[in-house]
Image (spheres, rainbow, N blue to C red):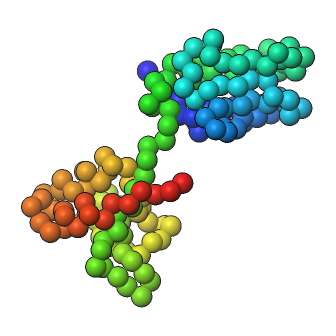
Amino acid sequence: MVMMKIDEFIEKVNRNDRMEAEEIDGVITIYNDSDHEVIDIPNGATNLLEIDFIESYSRYNFGKPSREYLSALIEEFLHTPIKERFPEKKYRVRLRGFNSDNGHQYLTTKKTDGESRVFACALRTDLKQEFTFDEINKIINRPAFKGTWVLDMIRAGIESVDE
């Protein structure tokens, strides 16, 4: 089954020069190339009857290729389970008690020679320091961390990343 997240749906709509999409307050609004609102899709819609096709839609249609493109995207979006449409929440792990001249230290991973290293580092954009909850669980389940104080430190330092 193909899954389509809300941000992916919007990105794909925006690839077509004849239309543009944005999400506001839980509704994806699609505009034509004249900036007329033509379709409103609630984030929780599961069928076409929940989509609001603006009354004057026929005056502002897209042409057959663009309609077919948009129709396929909408169909894929509607078949995606609602819980799968939202991006996975990301977290940072502040390692309390670990500080440097550059600030607080965070759980960090970096692939080197095909192997993922785990270490502490101040916030840097070139290193992986934001993780899904599943990724954090994989890290804390490494044999080197089981039953150690590091495990407790990681669990205590989990902070939500505000997007």
As drawn, the residue found furthest toward the front would be 25
**Which residue is nearer to you in this view: 31 or 112?**
31
Q: Which residue is drawn at 44% across and 66% down?
A: 127
Based on the displayed image, in which of its 4 quarters is residue 115 positioned? Answer: bottom left
Based on the displayed image, in which of its 4 quarters is residue 54 positioned? Answer: top right
Based on the displayed image, in which of its 4 quarters is residue 60 positioned? Answer: top right
Q: Residue at x 74, y 23 (%)?
A: 39
Q: Taking 160 as reference, is 63 above or below it?
A: above
List x then y, in percent, for residue 11.
65, 38
Q: Classify residue 68 as left or right of residue 59.
A: left
Q: Taking 107 as reference, is 122 above or below it?
A: below
Q: Taking 106 as reference, is 41 above or below it?
A: above
The answer to whether any part of residue 84 appears in the image is yes
**Which residue is nearer to you in this view: 36 or 5?**
36
Q: How many marks?
A: 0
Q: Classify residue 92 as left or right of residue 6.
A: left
List x then y, in percent, for residue 109.
34, 63
